[in-house]
């Protein structure tokens, strides 16, 4: 009944409204639901927490299920107290940056309904790491819920040089570790909408960045959010550096910048205005997950991109993903998707 109501009643209405407005509305509903016990009970009854019948142990962390909310949705850390009741075992907050960031001018989101995708042009909009640390400290987060923090460089002209960009990453990483906020950290080197582009998705720059980050005391696992539009040879050069420097793993991957990969490219704007989420990421992500697992069997892989069904989720895990991250599937398929994946995972 819940699936049918979402598909036939709620989704058609929501998809007629501005996606930025809907995002803001759902964050407000999520905040209220997490703070008001009866509302939280209703959300839990409808969707359900991960059962924990089949847990995963990854880099010393116990996950009650395989599904995490990907970075990009809860970028200001408002929802960590309610997501467990929706079937998420954890989330990535952010990406957070050293300074507050207004993001790109709107519209920042554009639905591509026939392509099962969203054109994302947020530009790392967030309140800045110090404000987000304070907010997380106020949240009553379930003890079983795993909190990851995605870190990027502030999207402004002050980071036009490599040196300033590294300082920006290091400030956020240092502050989070000083305050002991987060169970793991993901370094986002592949945001397609940031000032200066993906300058740390190049071998020499990545080595410099990770070398500086490794100087900061940290006991938490670290992952790298990877681009998916690189060919395997270039991608493997980044993996080699990540492996050499003792980074635990990777998130594969970020948005697809090639509009021609969409099932219906005409749904996108003619000019480039952000990367594509969802279905256009699926094949690229799966291919890179499979090759990474073959060449780096010891590396943790979080599979992200194009998870629209439980079968999509299980395919990523079959190819080598240890954990899963999603946003678009929750929007296009419905918020019941996480629980459906959890049940399929328990039966696998």
Image (cartoon, grey):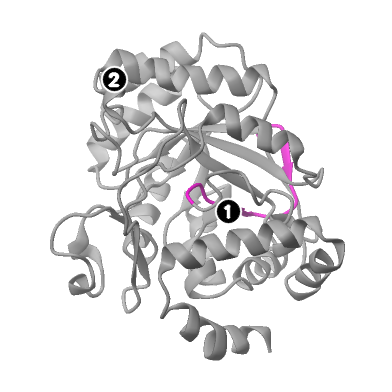
- Residue at 61% across, 44% down: 77
Give the answer, above or below, for where 136 lies relative to 318.
Answer: above
Local crowd size for mark 1, using a 10 Å CA cut-off: few (<14), some (14–19), many (≥20)? many
- The residue lying toward the viewer, choosing from 240 and 259, is 259
Residue 309 on the magenta span: no
Q: Residue 205 got which mark?
A: 2
Q: Residue 178 got which mark?
A: none
Q: Residue 69 got which mark?
A: 1
Give the answer, above or below, for where 232 lies relative to 44.
Answer: above
Q: Is residue 121 left or right of residue 298?
A: left
In percent of width and height, residue 197 lies at 24, 35
Mark 1 or mark 2, earlier in chain: 1
Give the answer, above or below, for where 92 lies relative to 29.
Answer: above
Specify the farthest residue to the top: 215
Residue 57 occupies quadrant:
top right
Q: Circle 2 sits in a helix, a strand or a loop, which is it? A: helix
Magenta-drawn segment: 59-72
Residue 62 on the magenta span: yes
Q: Quadrant of the N terminus?
A: bottom right
Q: Is residue 217 left or right of residue 138?
A: left
Give the answer, above or below, for where 53 lies relative to 190.
Answer: below
- The residue lying toward the viewer, choosing from 275 and 132, is 132
Work out whether residue 52 can be spotted: no
Pointer 1 with pointer 2, Cβ within 8 A: no
Instruction: Compute the Cα span from label 1 to label 2.
Output: 28 Å
Q: Circle 1 sits in a helix, a strand or a loop, which is it? A: strand
In percent of width and height, residue 318 lies at 52, 57
Residue 62 occupies quadrant:
top right
- Residue at 18% across, 54% down: 272
Specify the farthest residue to the left: 270
- Residue at 34% across, 38% down: 190
């Amino acid at each position: 009944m819940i699936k049918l109501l979402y598909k036939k009643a709620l989704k058609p209405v929501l998809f007629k409204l501005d996606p930025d407005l809907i995002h803001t509305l759902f964050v407000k509903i999520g905040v209220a639901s997490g703070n008001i016990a009866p509302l939280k009970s209703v959300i839990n009854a409808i969707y359900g927490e991960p059962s924990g019948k089949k847990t995963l142990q990854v880099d010393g962390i116990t996950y009650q299920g395989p599904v995490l909310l990907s970075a990009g949705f809860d970028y200001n850390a408002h929802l960590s107290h309610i997501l467990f009741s929706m079937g998420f075992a954890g989330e990535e907050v952010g990406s957070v940056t050293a300074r507050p960031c207004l993001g790109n001018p709107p519209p920042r989101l554009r639905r591509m309904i026939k392509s099962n995708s969203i054109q994302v042009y947020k530009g790392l909009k967030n309140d800045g790491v110090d404000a987000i640390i304070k907010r997380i400290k106020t949240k009553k987060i379930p003890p079983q819920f795993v909190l990851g923090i995605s870190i990027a460089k502030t999207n402004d002209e002050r980071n036009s040089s490599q040196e300033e960009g590294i300082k920006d990453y290091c400030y956020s990483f240092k502050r989070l570790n000083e305050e002991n906020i987060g169970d793991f950290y993901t370094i986002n080197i592949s945001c397609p909408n940031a000032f200066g582009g993906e300058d740390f998705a190049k071998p020499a720059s990545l080595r410099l960045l990770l070398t500086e980050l490794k100087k900061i005391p940290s006991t938490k696992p670290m992952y790298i959010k990877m681009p998916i539009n690189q060919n395997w040879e270039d991608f493997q050069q980044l993996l080699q550096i990540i492996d050499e420097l003792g980074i635990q793993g990777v998130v594969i991957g970020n948005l697809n910048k090639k509009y021609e990969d969409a099932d219906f490219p005409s749904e996108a704007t003619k000019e480039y205005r952000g990367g594509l989420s969802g279905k256009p990421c699926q094949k690229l992500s799966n291919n890179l997950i499979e090759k990474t697992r073959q060449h780096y069997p010891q590396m943790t892989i979080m599979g992200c991109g194009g998870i629209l069904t439980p079968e999509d989720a299980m395919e990523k895990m079959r190819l080598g993903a240890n954990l899963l991250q999603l946003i678009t599937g929750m929007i296009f398929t419905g918020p019941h998707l996480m629980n459906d994946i959890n049940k399929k995972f328990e039966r696998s």
